[in-house]
Image (cartoon, coloured by chain):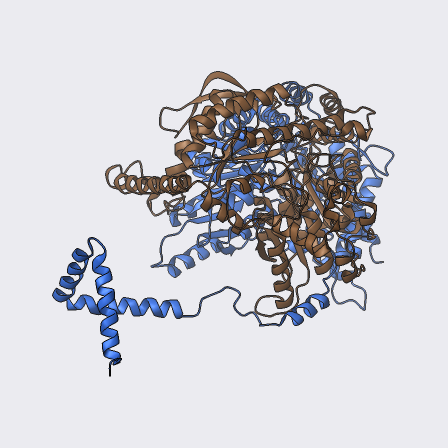
Amino acid sequence: MTSTLQVPTIEIQGANPRRDSPRTRPRTFSLSSLVGKTRRAYSVSSAYPPKIHPALALPVPKSSGDHSLSVRDHVFGDVWTDPRQSLCSPASNLTPAQRRNSVAAASRRYEDFEQKMEAAPLFVLVSTYLNYLVLILFGHLRDILGKVFKRKKYAHLRTNEGYAPLVSDFDSFYTRRMYLRIRDCWNRPITGVPTRKTMILERKTTDFNETFSLTGRKIEAINFASYNYLGFAQNTGPCADAVQDAVREYGISTANSRLEAGTSDLHVQLERKTAQFVGKEDAIIVSMGFATNSTTIPALVNKGCLIISDELNHSSIVFGARLSGASIRVFKHNNMVDLRELLREVISQGQPRTHRPWKKIMIIVEGLYSMEGSIVNLPELIRLKREFKFYLYIDEAHSIGALGENGGGVCDFYGISPKHVDLLMGTFTKSFGAAGGYIAGDKTVIDHLRVRNHAFCYAETMSIPITQQVLTSLSIIRGEEGTNDGRDRIQKLADNSRYFSAKLRALGFIVYGDEGSPVIPLLLFNPAKISAFSREALKRGIALCVVGYPATPIISSRARFCVSSSHTREDLDDALEKISEIGDILMLKFKETSS
Amino acid sequence: MADDPNHVINATLGSVYKLILAIPGSNIALTYIKTAYQHDPFRIVLELFLVFFALKYMLSKKYKPHDNAVKLTEKEVDDLVEEWQPEPLVPTLSSFDKFNLKNSQQINGPQSVKPKVADHSKPLMNLATTNYLNLVSSEQIRTKAIETLKNYGVGSCGPPGFYGTIDVHMDLEHDIAQFLGTEQAIIYAQGFSTISSVIPAFSKRGDLLVVDEGVNFAVQKGVQISRSNVRWFKHNDMDDLERVLEDIRTEDHRKRLTRRFIVTEGLFANQGDIAPLDKLLDLKKKFKYRLILDESQSIGVLGSRGAGLTDLFNVPATSVDMIVGSMANALCASGGFCAGNEEVVDHQRLAGSAYCFSASIPAMLAVSASQAISIILNQPSLLAELNDRARSFRVVLANKSLEPLVDIHVGDIESPSPFFHIRAKLSFLRSRLRDYETEFSREDEEQLLQDVVDECAYQGVLTTRAKYVYDQERACPRPSIKIHVTIGLSKKENDKAAGIIKAAIIKSFNKWKK
């Protein structure tokens, strides 16, 4: 069966991984290195997930808290490699140290990031900054003049009858002077199922984006905006049928929190099934993805503990970390060298001021970063974990279902046993076409969370239709229905993602994201191009997300494509053609096309 | 001597000068500098001072946040890393945790007024859920939800900003705003996360929150994460609130005006009592505060239309700046909302982190909430019926035989609250202390209440103790059994259930520690 699942490797000139040598990333920037940038020593190119080379298989600890493994033996004893390196290339002859370096050097660093920006065509850089400068100058000028001449319109920015302004003019400057101008690119209302096509309700504005009204016209667009990775956003089919039956029988809600008589047998069933799927002993489910992080992290760490967080972690993780009262340190995005240095520093220095040892250290990373399309360097993290004895919490909001041969997330993707990760968190919003999230871990940990997790104790339970949708989609993904539907979806997604990003690169766009990532960001740079790209795309019937500062660094505004298994090849080709057209208009093809 | 140092310097300066002159246009610059200095000796002093200042600044010690670091050698760092042993990820479960885990009921099959509960053969009469108006069994809601499923699927697959705003969301926002009588409303995907996202969206570091001590956990967390200055006032004590506000007024006499908010709950989840909205509004106006009101418990049950506290007090909803509510409690759907004027709502679309960074609520649930609101609007008799049930329930429990044993919060027969807490009387607990005990523990008390819950279940009534994340509550409320009345039970069943609870309390309390 596995042989039928081989993904055709897409050969794109200049975009192919070089597996023959451990590449250290060139320090000086060139466009070709930017394109090759995402090829990391551990990135996986054709058939995934990598099969673990028998010689490399790790002894599985009994529980993730088990640190009895001798650190020294294992750190250098066995080494995680890209298995295809060891199977089909001479790279396996490298010494462990070399290989580790190659992994480290290939992962993205902030310095690399900055270099890249500096060396991106100079006129782009200059014009981007100029763009912002003009916007800021004009904004302030308008503010100053407005406050003098249009006192009524600017009343909300002044102290009013003894009330301080609800939003101060400094805080809201960005919103009023930049976001407002291009606000039509966000919060576009839709109707119907957000599947391969989505139906957008056209809006118009008569007051420069202050307010919108619906025109009543509907625009059908190819959907690259929804996180519908495995195409489970459906209104027909087995999931919809099962949900319908469940609603008929169970209703909608269980009308209280999990601990106070709101637990339904469906919840228990889903928890068991989720735990099996991700390969942990037990799991709990929470009715909202955001809350899964924000209410779990405070239940795990508190004062005297340290959270080490990737700089690009999602807002919900930041929210939870702040609530927990633990100290927080941040490391450069996916940069294991920086993390290693940080770990040595924090462990040797202990808590700030008192220098007492940390009670525990928890590293929180995401499996797949939704704005970058980068995949966490898990093998290196696991190695660090054994050296430094921290706890590892992975947020698989985007990667669960979307990565790995079985859709099992990053562990599945790398072929690493989930036992090495202490807590696997994920959401059901994306690949499962539902809502909410889960946290999976050892039985003792999950039992602890059952009485300490805020959402479990106080919040509403996952509603019945959502629970049923996840139950059914999960069994389809696992192939329990006896069909190949799940496998096909995973395969299709992998094909589509690879095809689409490779084609975009070949067209000459600057594209981020690791191979295999269904999230594909395309760099726009200039703030003016954010709206232009989005509007041009909508004109041509493409729905996509555009993001700028503050969600991204100020210089690297981007458009983001979320590929789905529901997209057909024709959809992708059609979209590519139109995007190419937009790219010509907006001068986004920074790289010479390689044809 | 030929290499007289003066000579050398002069020669070097001369050649440098020539070099500079060789640059085209340098002549003009030099002349400009020369004349500028000749005319303005003060300028020389100033510029020299600036040069010194810049040098001093550059040479001064840099401020680093972690600069009390101890200098360690590589070897020492290695050793320290080797040596460090973390605590286990979670502590072993305490006996109390195990007790709580064991004693949370599981419903097999649909939630309803008479659900099947695991380990019980017969269905139990349900007094443990917020199904006040029996909306969980509403056929109308189910039919509408299924209709929605056929048009929209289940998940919304994206945050509201990224094509996750569905037309039914806009309808629901409109419905809520109209139901309450505010300008606009914004919906969040989970009731619990709403208030803890709304508070930090408006109140930042340096702003001021004046908060009731009795607020629920979600509000506490919102207050905590906002990092604002916080002042607490005694639960529902308007005199104390006035005192606090007066204190603040004298304190920040000359300070810059910051945003100031009073934060309180409409119907308190932990006490079952109601905030005196009229007095709150007076104080808020007098001292110029904005009011954030958490109506999670009160929406759909209080007031003649069920529109919450403002409805009950008959004041326009626009007089409260932010009304935060939940659609998961009385409305039996899911999600939360914040209603207010256009500015309040619009600001949250970018600043409400749980709105902005989370997938929007599934269409089916939004439609269910819309339906629930329309049911309440169209059948005001439901609310009257609920009031009636609550009243007769309280009448039964106001029995003399319970007086020495328990307190009812709120036990006032006229209280419009559809739920109340039963707490053991302190005098009773003290009277049952064994000789060697000086104080009773929380565990003892919970155990006693669990006995009552078990006895009730045995007699055919499902109740539950109120559960808390004990160690994270600001001041954890005393243990209680939380009773929710429902119109799903007929008048007769309602009275019967009340009788069973009364009997169970008497039985368990009398047996306890004897």
Q: Looking at the image, which residue is at 55% across and 25% down? A: B166
Q: How many marks?
A: 0
Q: Quadrant of residue A243?
A: top right
Among the chains pictured, the one given blue colouring is B
Determine whether, in the image, residue B225 is placed left or right of residue B498: left
Residue furthest to the front in view is B2
**Residue plotted at (60% across, 31% down):** A502
Quarter placement of the C terminus of chain A: top right
Instruction: Farthest residue to the left: give it.
Output: B39
Residue nearest the viewer, comparing B495 with A518: A518
**Residue B267 versus residue A464: which sits nearer the camera?**
A464
Q: Looking at the picture, does residue B331 appear above or below residue A192?
A: below
Q: Position of residue B137 (x, y in %)?
A: 71, 26
The residue sitting at 78% across, 46% down in the picture is A417
Occupied quadrant, residue A324: bottom right
Q: Quadrant of the N terminus of chain A?
A: top right
Q: Is residue B421 left or right of residue B198?
A: right
